[in-house]
Image (cartoon, rainbow, N blue to C red):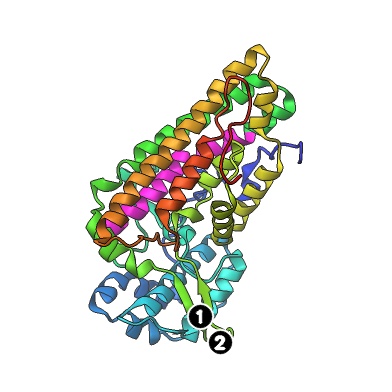
Amino acid sequence: MNTMPLTTDLRGYEIDPVRGFLPARDPLERLPAAFRPWEDVCARLPALMAAGRARDVVGRLEPVTAAPPHDRRELWRAYMLLSLLANAYVMDGEKRARTLPRAVALPLCETAAALDMPPIPTYATLVLHNWARVDRSGPLDLDNLVPLCPFSGGMDEQWFFLSMAAIEAAGGPSLAAIADLGAGIADGRPERIADALTRIADTCQAMIATLRRIPERCDPYIYFHRVRPPMAAWGEPGVVYEGVGAAPESWDAASGAQSALLQALDAALGVRHGDDTGAFLRRMRTYMPPGHRRFLADLEAGPSVRDHIVRLADRDDGAKLRGRYNDAVDLLDTFRRRHMEITVRYLSQQSGTEEVAYGTGGTDFVHFLHHTRREASAHRIGQSGHRPAQDGG
């Protein structure tokens, strides 16, 4: 295990010390004029999806002959536009398309490759880079955000995805605190560790408060029947990217599991998940921006704050650190419990059957969330400093 802390300069991981995994600069709102065909059709997607004409219109797009974007903000904007156009083409109508036309497929794959992302709508495109502030000097919260590119349209869809962005913003300051955890271990400064754990707990509280606001403007019935279906996975037999390759490709749908935030909090607190849940979470990292993937890998390779606190169990400051640590674990568990309550209400209670309701990522979400909660809460540190027994890891 690496004994060196994470660098406190989070920018190398595409992380902002205040905004966290959201971009440090507000997302670009429009590409240069040469890319207007993508912009114009994307702006019409909600109306086209409602009329069942999205595939027709997207399929008639002519190739854009301009040189591909090189500026990173332009690349993210292009990736978002093209992935949404591709999803509209594939998912429109009663039957999914099995071939994506070259005019969309080729620039989508090129742009995705430049960003080291998969050529599919992801959490990064739908949430991290799909918002603008109404008051550009105002805060990043739900009351000051609007979407840049709605997909099927309507307040319920917009509120749901903006809620995810607001949760990311609320949790953003935890990442600088996470970097301070490692630094506190390396420096042998328990007061720095205690402060970092308090800041992590505070951000979890803010995340919970934002999560609770989802039902304000996102109705469970509308979410289940209108918002969720067109964002489903591109499963087997897959989609052929015309002009790129002959073999069909299959991808997971955009999912909250593709957010690095909870995985970062788990890694920082030394939470390890079992084989099933852990394998799924690791697979979801494929859909994260590369800097976020590296941040998680470095966190997991770094020193364990939990093990450090257990070693201090017999010292005066050990009890204080244990309390701060357990507070953070408890609040992370509370977030997951609230999340589970919302997803039960929005999925299983809307399915109208006894069948298992699956999340957009294709998992049995009740099983998944139950196990991630149990695995995380099992890491609380008892007074003896011993690690509680836990199932699966």
Query: Mark 1: which amino acid?
Result: Ala
* Picture coordinates of residue 183, whole percent (x, y): 69, 31
Name the dominant secondary structure of the magenta segment. helix
Is residue 166 rendered magenta in the image? Answer: yes
* Picture coordinates of residue 370, whole percent (x, y): 44, 46
Mark 1: give few (<14), some (14-19) or many (20+) Cα within 10 Å.
Answer: many
Residue at the extreme top of the image, as rendered = 316
Measure how far apart labels 2 and 1 are at the Cα level. Answer: 7 Å
Task: Please give left or right for residue 143 compared with residue 387 in the image.
Answer: left
Circle 1: element type: helix
Q: Quadrant of the C terminus?
A: top right
| 282 versus 192 height, above or below | below
- Please tell me which residue lies in front, 153 or 302: 302
Disc number for residue 105 = 1
* Picture coordinates of residue 169, whole percent (x, y): 44, 43
Disc number for residue 243 = 2
Is residue 138 visible in the rendered image? The answer is no
How many numbered discs sit on the rendered protein? Answer: 2
Residue at 68 percent of width and 15 percent of height: 314
Is residue 188 rendered magenta in the image? Answer: no
| 209 versus 155 height, above or below | above
Residue at 47 percent of width and 40 percent of height: 171
Residues in magenta?
154-179
Asked whether the residues under the numbered discs 2 and 1 touch, taking CB atoms below 8 Å apart as contact, a structural biologist would say yes
Circle 2: element type: loop
